[in-house]
């Protein structure tokens, strides 16, 4: 790793990267970054890849394929990088103690510590992300923030670095993270060459919001607010002004606004706009024109729809449809 020498280009030994894996690990969280590091080796920038698991031996991935002959933590030795892979089990329940202890032992020997997808839950559970910026798969970002309130979760980021800790969004974003590590170690040219070889963006446009549903996270707990959000989601084009929503819930506008901020972390107007944007995205992907999607979603005009796409998704309605409507060129 480049921080071990003032000139990373003169270092000839391989950088040692340990992948922490376990039964149920998401295979692409391992093989995606692993292929980036392999391609770096073909360019003369060697990485030694070491799969490590809590007990050593064979590990069965979530896809059912087996990673054979993983090493126990005691055999890992000093490391340049620890990369904690993800798996749904890390977000759906407390992280198993054996994974935590293995990660803690490996992190103590590593110059930098990275997590792909829900691997961030491991670092967060160990307190490594307290007070730091971090991300994870969009589907689990709200859970990470709720379970670890001291972590500054940024749900739209594809990957983040804060000090020696790095986290990435879900699954394929591990490739983005690994490219960033290679660029940090060896500069942009090798990373650019690897991205071309793998036929991926070196820096893909937009954030996770382009891939996720606009309205994610736990439902509102207050029964009136939950009924209201369900009604807006069912008919986003309706006349959902603040006075109208307050009247529908028999709450004052001030109290309703306070509930939105407390439970959903936003204002009523912004929540309604996101609900309409989510519906507009669905309409675009099912064949509606920009004008039709704007009108049917309640956003009104083409220009209002374009502004909402730019503000929340960092793209245009036309570009979004071209990117996500079909796999056909």
Image (cartoon, rainbow, N blue to C red):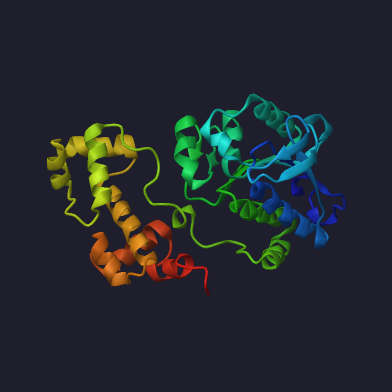
Q: Residue, x 67% and y 30% (percent of image)? A: 99
Q: Is residue 289 left or right of residue 34?
A: left
Q: Residue, x 71% and y 56% (percent of image)? A: 36
Depth order, front residue of 307/222: 222
Q: Residue, x 70% and y 38% (percent of image)? A: 21
Q: Residue, x 47% and y 50% (percent of image)? A: 156
Against 174, residue 108 (above or below) is above
Can you give x and y, in whole percent of width and height, for residue 169 in the image? Answer: 55, 48
Can you give x and y, in whole percent of width and height, for residue 79 in the image? Answer: 78, 39
Depth order, front residue of 278/8: 278
Farthest residue in the right direction?
Answer: 12
Can you give x and y, in whole percent of width and height, for residue 267 in the image? Answer: 28, 44
Can you give x and y, in whole percent of width and height, for residue 177 in the image? Answer: 63, 51
State which quadrant residue 192 falls in.
bottom right
Farthest residue in the bottom direction?
Answer: 329
Against 9, residue 22 (above or below) is above
Image label count: 0
């Amino acid at each position: 790793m480049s921080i071990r020498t003032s000139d990373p280009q003169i270092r000839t030994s391989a950088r040692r990267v340990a992948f922490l894996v376990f039964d149920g690990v998401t295979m692409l969280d391992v093989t995606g970054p692993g292929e980036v590091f392999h391609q770096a080796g073909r360019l003369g920038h060697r990485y030694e890849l070491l799969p490590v698991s809590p007990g050593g031996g064979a590990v069965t991935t979530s896809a059912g394929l087996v990673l054979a002959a993983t090493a126990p933590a005691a055999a890992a030795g000093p490391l340049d990088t620890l990369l904690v892979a993800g798996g749904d089990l890390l977000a759906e329940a407390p992280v198993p103690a054996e994974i935590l202890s293995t990660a803690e032992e490996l992190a103590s020997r590593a110059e930098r510590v990275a997590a792909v997808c829900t691997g961030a839950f491991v670092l967060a559970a160990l307190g490594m992300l307290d007070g730091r910026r971090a991300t994870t798969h969009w589907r689990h970002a709200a859970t990470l923030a709720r379970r670890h309130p001291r972590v500054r979760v940024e749900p739209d980021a594809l990957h983040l670095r804060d000090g020696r800790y790095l986290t990435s969004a879900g699954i394929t974003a591990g490739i983005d993270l690994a490219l960033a590590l290679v660029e940090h170690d060896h500069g942009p040219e090798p990373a650019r060459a690897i991205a071309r070889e793998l036929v991926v963006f070196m820096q893909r446009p937009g954030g996770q919001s382009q891939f996720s549903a606009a309205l994610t996270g736990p439902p509102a707990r207050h029964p009136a607010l939950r009924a209201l959000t369900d009604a807006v989601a069912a008919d986003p084009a309706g006349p959902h002004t603040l006075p109208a929503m307050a009247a529908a819930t028999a709450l004052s506008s001030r109290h309703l606004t306070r509930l939105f901020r407390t439970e959903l972390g936003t204002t009523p107007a912004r929540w309604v706009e996101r609900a309409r944007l989510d519906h507009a995205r669905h309409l675009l992907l099912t064949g509606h024109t920009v004008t039709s999607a704007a009108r049917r979603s309640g956003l009104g005009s083409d220009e209002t729809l374009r502004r909402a796409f730019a503000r929340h998704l960092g793209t245009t309605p036309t570009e979004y449809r071209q990117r996500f409507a079909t796999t056909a060129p």
